[in-house]
């Protein structure tokens, strides 16, 4: 009887150990494939930007890059740069790299007005909007991690890179 229980315990212990090993291996593979996916997205964004620079009729003034967030400036704005807490008024269109429009605010009767803080924007968009000026026209390109991450959004699956084309209409500085 004891021998049988011991065998069951060892068997159960081996099953648990194998289960942990398999889980670790699968999560390592998943993490590695996610890392590769994000590296590929960075390359895709950089190629997209190079193609923009080489396009006829497209004037790319400046490209900013910061950890998976890129801002390509088509028209330079004027005035003070947007910082956390400022009230921003803008129109935008969001799309993935297959040019499928996710959202277009230009069809609304009033532009979007939001305070620039983490509660109002996804992290990547917040980083991209920071530093913009009134009347600036830019594209903010986000890797899937900086866009909607592992949750995705609506028709966008998790870790989908997104382009936000933004025209900043007005920046009202935060009065501290």
Image (tube, rainbow, N blue to C red):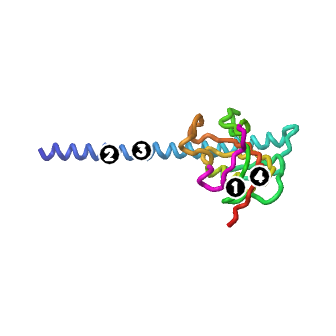
- The residue that disc 2 covers is 16
**Do tag 1 and tag 3 residues touch (Cβ < 8 Å)?**
no
- Position of residue 11 in the picture relative to residue 113 (left or right): left
- Residue at the spot of label 1: 87
Q: What element carries label 2?
A: helix
Q: Distance between the residues labelled 4 and 2?
A: 59 Å
- Against 11, residue 100 (above or below) is above
Expressed as whole percent of the image width and height from the top left, the position of residue 78 reads 83, 55
Q: Distance between the residues labelled 1 and 3?
A: 46 Å
Mark 4 vs mark 2: in front:
4
Q: How crowded is mark 1: few (under 14 residues within 10 Å), some or many (20 or more)?
A: some
> Looking at the picture, how far across and down is residue 125, in whole percent?
66, 49
Residue that numbered label 4 is attached to: 170
> Considering only order in the chain, which callout, 2 or 1, is on the residue closer to the N terminus?
2
Above or below, 121 against 56 in this view is: below
Cα–Cα span, label 1 and label 2: 54 Å
Residue under circle 3?
23
C-alpha separation, residue under disc 3 versus residue under disc 2: 10 Å
Chain part drawn in magenta? 108-121
Dot 4, crowdedness within 10 Å: few (<14), some or many (≥20)?
some
């Amino acid at each position: 009887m004891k021998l049988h229980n011991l065998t069951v315990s060892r068997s159960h212990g081996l099953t648990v150990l194998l289960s942990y090993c398999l889980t670790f291996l699968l999560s390592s593979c998943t993490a590695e494939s996610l890392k590769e996916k994000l590296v590929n997205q960075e390359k895709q964004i950089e190629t997209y930007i190079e193609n923009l620079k080489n396009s006829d009729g497209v004037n790319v003034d400046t490209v900013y890059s910061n950890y998976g967030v890129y801002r390509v400036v088509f028209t330079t704005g004027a005035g003070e740069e947007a910082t956390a807490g400022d009230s921003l008024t803008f129109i935008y269109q969001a799309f993935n790299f297959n040019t499928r429009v996710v959202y277009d605010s230009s069809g609304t009767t009033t532009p979007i007005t939001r305070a620039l803080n983490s509660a109002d924007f996804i992290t990547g968009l917040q980083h991209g909007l920071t530093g913009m000026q009134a009347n600036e026209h830019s594209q903010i390109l986000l890797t899937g991690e900086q866009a909607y991450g592992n949750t995705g959004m609506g028709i966008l699956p998790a870790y989908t890179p997104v382009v936000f084309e933004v025209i900043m209409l007005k920046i009202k500085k935060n009065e501290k």
